[in-house]
Amino acid sequence: MKQLLTLLLSLCTITATAQYKAAFMGDSIFDSWDSVKHGGHPEFFANNGFLNCGISGQVTAQMVARFEKDIIANAPEVVIICGGTNDIAQNKGYVSNRQIMKNIKTMTRLAEQNGIKVILCTILPAAKYPWKPEINPVAPIQNMNRRIARFAKCKKRGFIDLYTPLAAPDGSLPKKLSKDGVHPNSHCYNIMEKIILSNL
């Protein structure tokens, strides 16, 4: 009986510590990060105990819908949230910046209610969406990033500015960092990795 109790306690201890150091919740910016085909570095996640929960094309409402399954259920120490560019691109129709922020706040509160630390990231720069050339995203992205920064600051949450070190003066993601002006290339991911690791 004593041996059985010892075994059960051991299993409980393993379960309690068997979690990811960080989970990345986002869209294609995170999704491609885990794919060599798209210039990403899978080893960044494997070597650091990170979980990639990015899904290409998703808007923040879709992230909210799967947050319980993808983030809460995996119980990471930290969730890094970066989303909103597809909302601005109107992938699922027009969404106001106010609503995007509301979705980000919902994910933040869900995480905090479950004891998961939150780090909010700014949206990456983009001056044009190849799939939605009629939209000018520069001003909406900058506005969203100010909102995200304010929200993070008000509760002293984690905050990582990916926009400033990557953006060209015109608000674009430079050609040296991206093939299409939206999605990072391998060099861009190298920069992002250094920034992320220095903030964890």
Image (cartoon, rainbow, N blue to C red):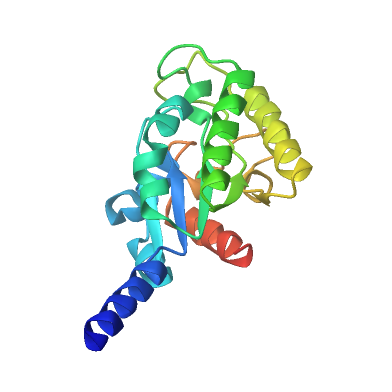
**For the view shown, which residue lies furthest in the front direction?**
1
Q: Residue drawn 39% across and 22% down?
A: 131
> Where on the picture, by quarter, is residue 141?
top right
- The reply to whether residue 116 is in sight is yes
The vertical placement of 86 against 193, above or below, is above
Q: How many marks?
A: 0
Give the camera-side residue of 194 and 168: 194
Q: Position of residue 34 (x, y in %)?
A: 34, 54
Residue for point 33% across, 77% down: 9
Q: Is residue 20 above or below residue 128?
A: below
Q: Residue at x 37, y 30 (%)?
A: 57
From the image, which quarter does the C terminus lie in?
bottom right
Q: Is residue 25 left or right of residue 147?
A: left
Q: Position of residue 12 (x, y in %)?
A: 34, 71
Quadrant location of the N terminus in the rendered image: bottom left
Residue 176 visible to the viewer: no
Observer-nearest residue: 10 or 61?
Answer: 10
Q: In front: 147, or 157? A: 157
Residue 135 in picture, x, y percent from top left: 53, 16
Tell me the residue at 41%/19% (across/down): 91
Rendering coords of residue 150 (x, y %): 76, 37
The reply, left or right, for residue 70 in relation to residue 170 is: left
Q: Left or right of 103: which side holds 71?
A: left
Foreground residue, 187 or 25? 25
User: Taking 59 as reference, is 7 above or below it?
Assistant: below
Classify residue 88 as left or right of residue 62. Answer: right
